[in-house]
Image (cartoon, grey):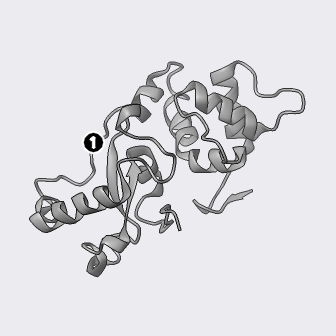
Amino acid sequence: MINPRYKVPIKKSKLHSYVKSRLGHSSGPGVSIYEMTCLALAKDGFPMPPGVSSKGWVTRNLHIVHAFHAKIVRDNSDEWVKAVNTKPQSKVDPKADAFLNSFEWRKVRMLAIKQYGNRCMCCGAGPSDGATINVDHIKPRKFYPHLALDIENLQILCHPCNHGKGNWDTTDWRPS
């Protein structure tokens, strides 16, 4: 099965492995693997918001399942949960990136937060939930440098959603 957002296959074996490690079992009578994965995600602090399908929620949080496989396979502890939830170390060194330190970017960033609020447009997390809020370029700055300061190209995402989106995805999570 191909995940339309990430364009990578969703391997049900990874979902079963994740659910079994988090809940102790990976199936229930009449319950889909997506519903079970949502229960495991909720246990790890990512509860499904109302109005979202279980398959959609799993798709949006597939990066957590992948983080699980990258870390828990080596070490059977809950350290991976801390790694997903802690404040990330940016791959871009802000001291080396003049754009991120520029007055123009900080001004447009603040305008975007004022316009859209400080909650993730993908999952709904906010600072009150302990989320780190990022201002994301819908069309990545790397490929569309002329849109770097265009407020119509910005959206508010929490760090896990922004990191999962990466600079290869142009999903627009803003309300239409």
Nearest the viewer among 148 and 75 is 148
Quadrant of the rendered image containing residue 5: bottom right
| Residue 173 horizontal side relative to residue 135, left or right | right
Given the image, on which type of amino acid does mark 1 rest?
Answer: Gln
Name the outermost residue toward the bottom.
Answer: 146
Residue at 37% from the left image edge and 33% from the top image edge: 128
Q: Which residue is mark 1?
A: 89
| Residue 139 horizontal side relative to residue 44, left or right | left
Residue at 27% from the left image edge and 42% from the top image edge: 89
Quadrant of the rendered image containing residue 132: top left
Residue at 18% from the left image edge and 52% from the top image edge: 93
Q: Residue 52 placed where, x, y %?
A: 66, 48
Mark 1 residue element: loop
Bin the neighbour count of mark 1 within 10 Å (Cα to Cα): few under 14, some 14-19, many 20 and up.
few
| Residue 164 horizontal side relative to residue 149, left or right | right
Q: Residue 83 placed where, x, y %?
A: 40, 31
Nearest the viewer among 137 and 169 is 137
